[in-house]
């Protein structure tokens, strides 16, 4: 049994880390193929080191570009190593262009495909991620659904063979990597002892739309003013560029913009936050697992379990709605039950692969 683990973004590295560790413990023959979708492998090498993961055997370094450019370069780059290695199965995780390219490359070469985090649906086809995850699900041989909701989504589309409810590897990742973060003291200098809220925002529908971007920032300013808490916002360089292009200014008295932080530091920031604002699916999950209330700056989510559990609310981009949701989440009891499993998803996935 030889396993190809295909990844290309930092969230994929995080969520695949429990699978990689489980493969190591089980003594499986595996290799990592890194597409470099967002960063070069050289930049991500520090990330692998910090999480104590083995490095990638293949580094495509495709870089960012249009959806067609990224996907095309990945398909071309993957073909040779997959032909040479002849893995029995290729694993992809989530909903990125790396997932789409990895899925297509594998099935075209007759390699069995496993999709980690299968069955998520926002039912919003304007999101490129939705197209990627739907396509991957429909060509996969093994589908590792994180929850019964995800399994039911697949069943409604006629996909029932090869589906396994494994829990979400994000639970494993949070638990395993939080220990590393605490051991290293990561993020200690960023945490405000007076209390703070945390913010992330990266989706193109928010960042590339000047009206939405300005509206969200106004909402956060209202939140900070009402509750007297600074909002820590590690901002991606692309967002800074958009702010300059759109001529939008940020009230730095209420919103503390920082440089992007490493994953372990961000995990510590999440743990210490009184409230998290995000448009990230992964952060919605992490907040739920860490028992930190979350307000999602979107009108839909492919993680409805977080809303059903009481850990998350959808605010959209209206300033008034963001403020309203913040108040409601701050008043909410944090005793919700984590819906994403027991932290043994990586082991289950590896056992299923080994016996399939």
Image: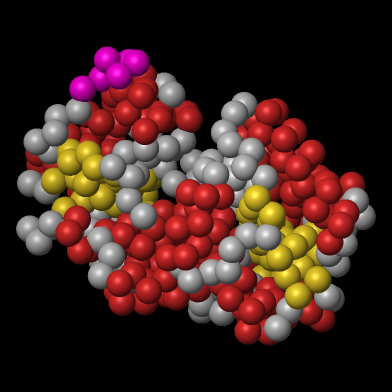
**Magenta run includes residue 245:** yes
Q: Could you tell me which quadrant the N terminus lies in?
A: bottom right
Residue at the spot 86% in from the left edge and 57% down from the top edge: 84
How far across and down, in percent of the image, does residue 180 sit? 37, 74
Q: Which residues are magenta?
A: 244-249
From what the image shows, is residue 115 above or below residue 235?
Answer: below
Where residue 337 sits, quadrant-wise, is: bottom left
Residue at the spot 73% in from the left edge and 56% down from the top edge: 154
Side of 296 where 92 appears, left or right: right
Q: Nearer the viewer, residue 262 or 284?
A: 262
Q: Could you tell me which quadrant the C terminus lies in?
A: bottom right
Residue at the spot 9% in from the left edge and 61% down from the top edge: 193
From what the image shows, is residue 29 above or below residue 25?
Answer: above
How far across and down, in percent of the image, does residue 342 sit? 51, 79
Would residue 351 be visible to someone looking at this image?
A: yes
**Magenta run includes residue 175:** no
Q: Nearer the viewer, residue 137 or 61?
A: 61
From what the image shows, is residue 348 above or below residue 169?
Answer: below
Q: Nearer the viewer, residue 324 or 208?
A: 208
């Amino acid at each position: 049994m030889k396993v190809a683990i295909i990844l290309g973004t930092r969230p994929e590295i995080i969520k695949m880390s429990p699978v990689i560790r489980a493969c190591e413990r089980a003594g499986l023959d595996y290799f990592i193929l890194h597409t470099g979708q967002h960063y070069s492998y050289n930049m991500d090498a520090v990330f692998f080191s910090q999480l104590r993961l083995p490095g990638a055997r293949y580094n495509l370094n495709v870089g960012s570009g249009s959806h067609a450019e990224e996907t095309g370069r990945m398909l071309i780059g993957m073909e040779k190593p997959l032909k040479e290695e002849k893995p029995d199965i290729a694993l992809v995780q989530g909903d990125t262009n790396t997932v789409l390219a990895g899925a297509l490359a594998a099935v075209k070469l007759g390699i069995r495909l496993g999709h980690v985090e299968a069955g998520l649906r926002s039912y919003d086809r304007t999101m490129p991620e939705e197209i990627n995850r739907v396509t991957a699900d429909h060509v996969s041989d093994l589908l590792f659904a994180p929850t019964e909701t995800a399994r039911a989504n697949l069943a409604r589309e006629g996909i029932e063979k090869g589906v396994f409810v494994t829990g979400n590897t994000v639970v494993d990742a949070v638990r395993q990597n939080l220990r590393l973060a605490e051991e290293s003291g990561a993020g200690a200098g960023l945490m405000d002892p007076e209390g703070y809220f945390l913010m992330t925002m990266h989706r193109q529908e928010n960042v590339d739309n000047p009206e939405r971007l300005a509206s969200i920032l106004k909402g956060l300013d209202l939140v900070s003013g009402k509750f007297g808490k600074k909002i820590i916002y590690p901002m991606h360089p692309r967002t800074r560029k958009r702010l300059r292009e759109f001529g939008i200014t940020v009230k730095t008295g209420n919103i503390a913009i920082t440089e992007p932080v490493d994953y372990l530091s961000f995990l510590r920031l999440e743990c210490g936050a009184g409230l998290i604002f995000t448009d990230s699916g992964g952060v919605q999950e992490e907040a739920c697992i860490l028992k930190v209330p979350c307000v999602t700056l979107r009108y839909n989510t492919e993680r409805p379990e977080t809303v059903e559990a009481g850990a998350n609310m959808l605010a959209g981009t209206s300033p008034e709605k963001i403020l309203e949701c913040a108040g409601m989440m701050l008043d909410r009891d944090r005793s919700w039950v984590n819906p994403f499993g027991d932290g043994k998803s990586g082991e289950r996935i590896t056992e299923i692969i080994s016996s399939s």
